[in-house]
Image (tube, rainbow, N blue to C red):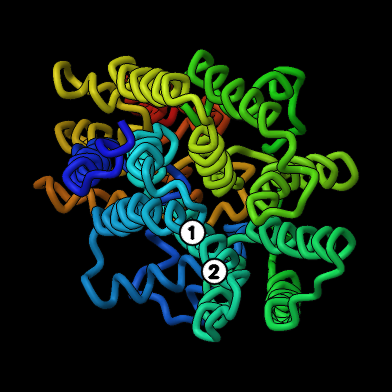
């Protein structure tokens, strides 16, 4: 089994299927609100200053991803599909990192098992098909952890420590939650010092530099945020159900899969509890898992709720690496092989209940608002004026601009020109117009304005269209 899981051909097959699942039907769904915002913010139409200002009015995350996306669009062209291709590319690269981490943690004989868990993970596939930061954040967080381990090797190369600093900073600049990884490193080093009295001069110096740059970056980030228009905040503190699975059902595609993987890591950890008596490098993975949940939860109860699954996408790295590492330490080959086979079977067969495999045999079910069908419906009608309803968002005007920009790109595939009405034009127009309401951002409050009657109405998976005329 170990030789089988170590074969290069098997890795190639896993990589092929991981790539296939990330690219197949990648643009089946239309963009959803966050992707629409990213597409608008990163538009080459805006200067960097203008793009930055729009970002700060509409996005609570840092500008780093949108800056990267803006550069990417300037190189390859401004196209609706390209951002998702970028995410899928980084998602595939993350699978390959299983080889590096397996070598560093000495479970090279089952490295392909980790590659399979990464390649077939429902959550990672999903965010590899979304034009947002999370797939790229996962990749650089993975690199940061890999080079943290490399920096602890005897006579660690200066190059490795430099790369560790760079990859950690990139991850932190991409998303504030990556600071959790930095705090995990500091926690591990403090534990290492008190238990073994060892002080790692080079890596401590590197972490201090990273911390300084991170503080300067986020001081500027908080100073530059413009949320004076903010009336919309939807994140809530975790409910009781969260504490029964800690997002594992989301990470692994179902309640059953979540329980299987949660129990796996808990049982394997209990079996190898002796690891906690020392300061082996794998302890940093346990610390990262703990802090990834603990810090956002505490912050949420003290100040404002912030914890949602995609913000801690990187926690899948220590979860999957630890499961593989702890299985590799099982001496009994029959038990080891049994666990690998069971987890592999459940992981593969779970896809038959998900769109990833079901779309190969049946028509895929849309999971995001159907903008294209809605625009097609307007195009086929006699009336081509429309009004976009956006309320209670970070910035109504920017949201309307972003959605209209997206609609304009979609409408290039249709014969008729559509005209966006502003609030004043909507009140004055005498002929019927379309009331375009994205229900995912309007909390399904798509009632028509007063003094207008509904002539027709149609829903397109979270897009509500009403043909209105003034009474």
Give residue 150's mark.
2
Give residue 301's mark.
none
Q: Going by the image, does 168 lie left or right of 34?
A: right
Report x, y in % for residue 200: 74, 76
Q: Identify the residue at horizontal 40%, vertical 18% (top origin).
A: 342
For label 1, the residue is: 104
Report x, y in % for residue 26: 24, 42
> Is residue 325 something one can see in this rendering?
yes
Q: Measured along the vertical axis of the image, is residue 380 above or below residue 74?
A: above
Q: Quadrant of residue 269?
A: top right
Residue located farthest toward the bottom when viewing the structure as drawn: 158
Q: How many marks overall?
A: 2
Are discs 1 and 2 less than 8 Å apart at CB? yes
Q: Identify the residue at horizontal 41%, vertical 76% (top origin).
A: 46
Q: Quadrant of residue 349?
A: top left
Report x, y in % for residue 137: 50, 58
Q: Identify the residue at horizontal 48%, vertical 43% (top origin).
A: 427
Disc 2, SS? helix
Q: Measured along the vertical axis of the image, is residue 369 above or below residue 417?
A: above
Q: Residues within 10 Å of mark 2 (few under 14, many from 20)?
A: many
Q: Earlier in the sequence, mark 1 or mark 2?
A: 1
> Is residue 83 something one can see in this rendering?
no
Disc 1, SS? helix
Mark 1 → mark 2, Cα distance in angstroms: 7 Å
Which residue is at the front of the view, 67 or 164?
164
Q: Identify the residue at horizontal 59%, vertical 60% (top origin).
A: 175
Q: Going by the image, does 80 lie left or right of 299?
A: left
Q: Measured along the vertical axis of the image, is residue 80 above or below residue 119?
A: below
Report x, y in % for residue 355: 29, 24
Q: Residues within 10 Å of mark 1 (few under 14, many from 20)?
A: some
């Amino acid at each position: 089994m170990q030789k089988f899981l170590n074969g290069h051909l098997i890795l190639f097959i896993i990589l092929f299927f991981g790539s296939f699942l990330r690219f197949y039907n990648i643009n089946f769904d239309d963009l959803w609100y966050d992707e629409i915002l990213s597409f608008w913010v990163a538009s080459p139409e805006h200067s960097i200053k203008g793009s930055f200002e729009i970002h700060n009015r509409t996005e609570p995350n840092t500008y780093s991803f949108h800056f990267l996306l803006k550069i990417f669009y300037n190189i390859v062209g401004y196209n609706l599909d390209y951002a998702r291709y970028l995410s899928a590319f980084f998602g595939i690269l993350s699978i390959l990192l299983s080889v590096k981490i397996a070598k560093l943690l000495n479970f090279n004989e089952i490295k392909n098992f980790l590659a399979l868990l990464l390649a077939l993970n429902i959550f990672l596939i999903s965010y590899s098909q979304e034009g947002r930061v999370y797939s790229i954040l996962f990749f650089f967080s993975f690199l940061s952890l890999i080079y943290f381990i490399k920096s602890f090797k005897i006579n660690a190369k200066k190059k490795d420590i430099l790369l560790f600093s760079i990859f950690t900073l990139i991850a932190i600049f991409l998303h504030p939650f990556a600071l959790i990884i930095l705090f995990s490193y500091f926690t591990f080093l403090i534990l290492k010092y008190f238990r073994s009295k060892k002080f790692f001069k080079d890596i401590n110096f590197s972490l201090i530099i990273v911390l300084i740059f991170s503080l300067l970056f986020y001081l500027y980030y908080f100073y530059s945020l413009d949320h004076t228009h903010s009336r919309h905040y939807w994140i809530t503190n975790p409910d009781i159900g969260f504490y029964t699975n800690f997002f594992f059902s989301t990470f692994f595609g179902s309640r059953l899969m979540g329980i299987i993987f949660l129990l796996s890591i808990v049982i394997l950890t209990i079996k190898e509890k002796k690891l906690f008596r020392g300061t082996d490098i794998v302890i940093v993975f346990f610390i990262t898992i703990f802090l990834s949940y603990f810090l956002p939860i505490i912050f949420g109860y003290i100040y404002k709720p912030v914890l949602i699954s995609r913000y801690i996408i990187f926690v899948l790295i220590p979860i999957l690496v630890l499961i593989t590492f702890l299985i590799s330490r099982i001496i009994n080959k029959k038990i080891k092989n049994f666990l690998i086979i069971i987890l592999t079977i459940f992981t593969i067969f779970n896809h038959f209940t998900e769109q990833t495999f079901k779309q190969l045999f049946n028509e895929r079910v849309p999971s995001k608002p159907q903008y294209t069908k809605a625009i097609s419906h307007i195009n086929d009608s006699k009336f081509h004026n429309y009004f976009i309803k956006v309320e209670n968002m970070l910035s109504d005007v920017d949201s309307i601009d972003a959605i209209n920009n997206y609609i304009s790109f979609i409408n290039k595939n249709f014969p008729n020109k559509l005209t966006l009405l502003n609030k004043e034009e909507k009140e004055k127009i005498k002929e019927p117009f379309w009331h375009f309401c994205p229900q995912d951002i309007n909390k399904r409050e798509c009632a028509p304005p007063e003094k207008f009657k509904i002539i027709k109405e149609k829903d397109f998976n979270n897009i509500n269209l009403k043909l209105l005329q003034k009474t």
